[in-house]
Amino acid sequence: SAWSPLPPEPRPPVRTERRLAPTAAMEGALLPVRTQSRMGRRRLCRALACTALVSAMGYMTTWPRALVGIAAGSTEGSTPAELGSSLSLMIGGTFAAVLGFLSVLQKRNLASNTSKGWKGADIKLFSICLAVGWLIRFALPIPAGVTAQAWSMLAIFVAMICGVVLAPLPSAGPTVVALAIAVFTGTVTFAEGLAAFTDEVVWLVLLAFFFAEGFQKTGFGDRVALTIIKSVGSTPLGVAYGLNVAELAVAACMPSSAARAAAVFYPITISVARASGSDPATGTRMKCGAFLVECCYQATATSSCLFLSGAAQNYFVIKLAAGVGVEVPSPFTTWTMAALGPGLASFLLAPLLAMVLLPPEDKQTPEAPRVAASRLQRMGPMSDEEKVFAMVIAGMVGGWATASTTGVKPVVTALCGLASLMVTGVVTWEDCAKNFKAWGTFVQFASLVGLAAMLNNLGIVKWLATCITEKILVAGLKPVPSFFVILLAYWLVHYCFASQVAHVSALYQPFLLMLIQTGTPGLPAALALAFASNLFMTMTPYASAQSAVLMGDGYITQGEWYKCGFVYMIFYIVLWITVGAAWWRLIGLI
């Protein structure tokens, strides 16, 4: 009918799609899309990581000055305890992040097919150095009278010394890292950190390396060495005593111990070692080289004590003693007579101790004199280069010997000597530029001297001296025990110094007054500290200017140097106190 409902409209058939298995062609078409997707995720992760790093760096720039406690704006709203806690966590976390990043980088480097080996820091040793610095700065309470800046400097310096000893990085690496941390944290300014790069003694060290190069290049060093071996070379001990006698003779008229050891006798010593077949490059340093280098260094310490003219700081000591009322009558005669007894004993016994600490593998060299004579004959007469080099060295020795009269500083004499060698073509700039050991030592020693100077400038050294004096007074020690304690403290504190002159200028007068106030007569006290100021040059590889040079060729390792330095410290203290006391009684000094 008209009103009957319409039939429902038919629904369209449901279309079912069958998914076909992807073909190789389809996979190839989809691969770029998937790759782009993965690359997109990587870019996102990198962007997030960079954002986090930038944020962290922005946050980290707020704590360097707060670390040393000199920026009031960075400490507002925080108590010192809260600030110290947050800083310790922040810096500890930063150290952990750095070590983690280095660990990942090292693994990736070693897993790479094109890797030539990991050239970065030894992570385990590096972590020890960082941990030492962190513990000193944050785990130990800052003593009264010491600023946070000074305590931070001490933490950085001790961590740096750990780096120098453990060597997580080669050459100057640990000192550069320490210098960077000190400057970044605001502990020192950039100018203060690099101040020692213009120091005269530091440049004298660098120039000494270039003169050593001239000794080897011209063959003059070999000629001198072979002549010594020909005369006294039947045993390494005989060679050591022969070199020591020459050192004593020159020390009487050459007041720069750094120039004497580093620029004259050390090149001769290594020439003797190499002529005897001992060279670190060939793994034969223990044949006789390590022993001879150790003897060379100890001879410089002894000769510096024997003569007032043996070291530059000796004249300074006389002046400082007079400044606190201790006059040294007839300085040259009094000095030499006071040092003669214990000095000769040191001269005779120090090489014997070196035979125990660094025994040469070749105890007897009966053929050495004959071989040396044969090689001298083959070398023939001196070449023009040898003659020019010998004349320049002789001129420098004369300049150093008359420095007090002419007023020409030793470093100026050395610089003129190098210029003369360059003008005559004996040593070229290319020879100097490629001497990476010289430049590495220069950077390392300058960094050490600069940071060590800041320890004194910030009051750490004076604080140590004050603490020692207070302990002595509280303990009520008598004059003799007080003398031992003060002298030992004066000696040990040199671990914090990279310069004998800096140590003397900072501590000689305070410690001299300590000795006098605790009952030691003025003149013996002044001379005892003066001799100690020369003898502690052998304690560490950075204890003096010449230390850095003698360390450079690798005849003595870092560990051996510290071990020998500690043993010789005990040896000198016992020898100079026992023999010195008997000798001083004999000549009426005490």
Image (spheres, rainbow, N blue to C red):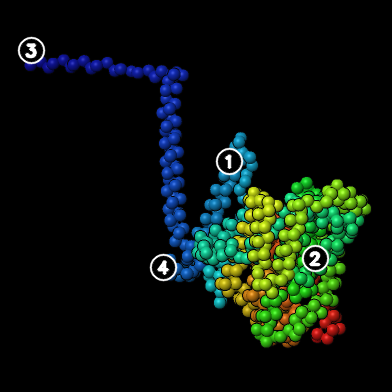
As drawn, 407 above or below 182: below
Which residue bears the numbered disc 1? 108
Residue at (68%, 60%) from the top-left corner?
417
Q: Residue 73 — which label?
A: 4
In the shown orientation, is residue 108 left or right of residue 495?
left
Q: Badge 4, how many Cα within 10 Å: few under 14, some, many 20+?
A: few
Residue at (86%, 63%) from the top-left corner?
241
Residue at (64%, 75%) from the top-left corner?
505
Residue 68 lies, in percent from the top left, at 51, 67
Which residue bears the numbered disc 3? 1
Distance between mark 4 and mark 1 Cα atoms: 42 Å
Pointers 4 and 2 in contact (C-beta within 8 Å) = no
- Residue type at mark 4 is Gly
Distance between mark 4 and mark 3 Cα atoms: 96 Å
SS at mark 4 in the image: helix
Residue 353 lies, in percent from the top left, at 84, 64
Distance between mark 1 and mark 2 Cα atoms: 53 Å
Q: Earlier in the sequence, mark 4 or mark 2?
A: 4
Q: Earlier in the sequence, mark 3 or mark 2?
A: 3
Distance between mark 1 and mark 3 Cα atoms: 87 Å
